[in-house]
Image (tube, coloured by chain):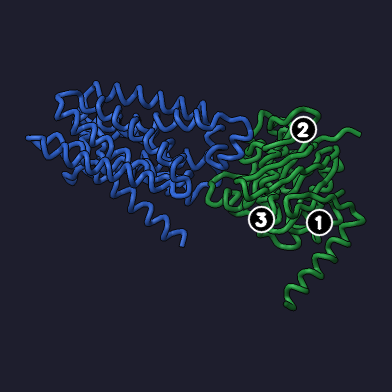
Chain colours: A green, B blue
Amino acid sequence: MNSIIEFKNVSFAYDKHNKVLHKVNFKIYENEFVAITGPNGCGKSTLLKLLLNQLKKETGSITIMEQEQHYNYQVMAYVPQNVGLLFQNFPANVYEVVGMNTKKTKQQVIEMIKTVGLEKQIKHRITQLSGGQMQRVAIAKALINQPKILVLDEPTTGIDKESMVLLYELLHQLSKNGTTIVMVTHDLAGCKNYITKALCLEDAHICELTKETIEDELLHKHRHQVEEWNY
Amino acid sequence: MELLAFEFIRRAIIVGILLAAVLPCIGMIVVLKRLSLVGDALSHASLVGVTLGILLGMNPVIVSIVVCVIAALLSEVLRKYIPNFKENAIIIILSLSVALSGIFSSKIKSSVNFTSYLFGSIVTVTNTDVFIIAVLTILVLSVFVLLYKKLFLITLDEKNAILSGIPVQKINLIFTIVTAITIAIASKTIGVLIVSSLMVIPILCAMQISKSYFTTIINGIIFSLIFTITGIILSYYLDLRPGGTIALIAVCSYMLLLLKKQ
């Protein structure tokens, strides 16, 4: 099976003494739903910026759909962190936000809004929506041009448990329907039932967790936390 | 309507309608980019151009267009150097403009021209002014319609707009230049101290009642038209300065809308 994203020996540092990524290797395959996780400051966002070509790697290679990486918005779409802050006070409705990003017909835009379950809110101002609904609008906006890969940065920040589950279910469904999902998250416990694998970033290295090993990692993390609290 | 019998009033109303259509289009973008003060800074920069033009014996409007464009580009450059405090770039331009216009105006012997630029002289516009403003209206509205979708996406999320392949820097530059030209020309007719209020307040009013981006712009233009025409008529009957009357009506209307919403 061919990989859709491949990092091969990728290293990156902001300065000489602060190596963020050291010879990182991983592959993501078509239709996978991958979570990139790790403690604060471990380099998750840096990894995402390298994937989006916003930062230049020091060494190694990044290939997307077997081509040396050049961010192509028709292949990859990005949903940023804190969508609520971006949408704050913006006087547009759901249809405008999703439809403004495309040459698709009105019907196709409406279909996309239905896909993310917001057909009842289509004429609502985005400022009237909940955090979870705003996240869905951002996903519909990103998906309207049918990219192969959807990259999300901490999509569950600031949304309630119920909306979180609905969001994971939507992403899971999208990956089943042919979109590869790459999601940076802190919430490995919450998404473990929906993802196909997790990439855990720590001390500039990455380790791959399968569905089977995720539970061990969570248990280890839990024990570590308890020890820290006791200390 | 006896006042329509006067040609200067008819010209004032035409110019008022044209500017009322143009300024909210610019205002929509500056308000959403949280750069509402840009209108104030650039209108003060246009004052530098006016004083410099009078001192050098050159056409003040042309000099103020040049100075405004330079000030707008300078604020863009400053904004890149202080990305976390973007609004401070505007304050720097505003301070520089006030300082320079103060120094230049102290060298002007007659202050009549200078005062008319401060508070505007919409009832003294000439046929040439009407022509220039009509051309400006066509230019700004064309740019706004052509860049409508791209400006929407840049204003909503600039970083994602770059990732989506939109030439953000180029569009920002075009918009900055169009804004500078509009403010320089509008300052002459409605006044340096009033131009930014007509750019921003109609949009703030529209945002209180509109349900979409498109209707916010349309309602902003309608509010702007109402403020301008009412202002010109009231200023004629009450013998007030038109620019100040227009701005006062705009501010009062916004306050009323806020109260109604509360």
Residue at horizontal 58%, vertical 40%? B159
Could you tell which of marks 1 and 3 lies nearer the N-terminus?
3
Q: Position of residue A16 (x, y in %)?
A: 61, 46
Disc 1 packing (10 Å; few <14; some 14–19; many ≥20): many
Task: Find numbered disc 1 in the image and state the secondary structure of the residue it sits on.
Answer: helix
In the image, which disc is placed on residue A64? Answer: 2
Dot 2 and dot 3 within a common chain:
yes
Could you give the CA–CA distance between mark 1 and mark 3, rounded to whole angstroms? 21 Å
Dot 1 and dot 3 within a common chain:
yes
Q: Is residue A211 above or below residue A55?
A: below
Residue at horizontal 19%, vertical 28%? B53
Could you give the CA–CA distance between mark 1 and mark 2, rounded to whole angstroms? 25 Å
Q: Position of residue A156 (x, y in %)?
A: 71, 56
Left or right of B56 in this view: A182: right
Image quarter of the N terminus of chain A: top right
Disc 3 packing (10 Å; few <14; some 14–19; many ≥20): few
> Which residue is identified by label 1?
A191
In the image, which disc is placed on residue A41? Answer: 3
Q: Position of residue B201 (x, y in %)?
A: 38, 47
The residue lying furthest to the front in this view is A16
Circle 2/circle 3 CB separation < 8 Å? no
The residue lying furthest to the left in this view is B109
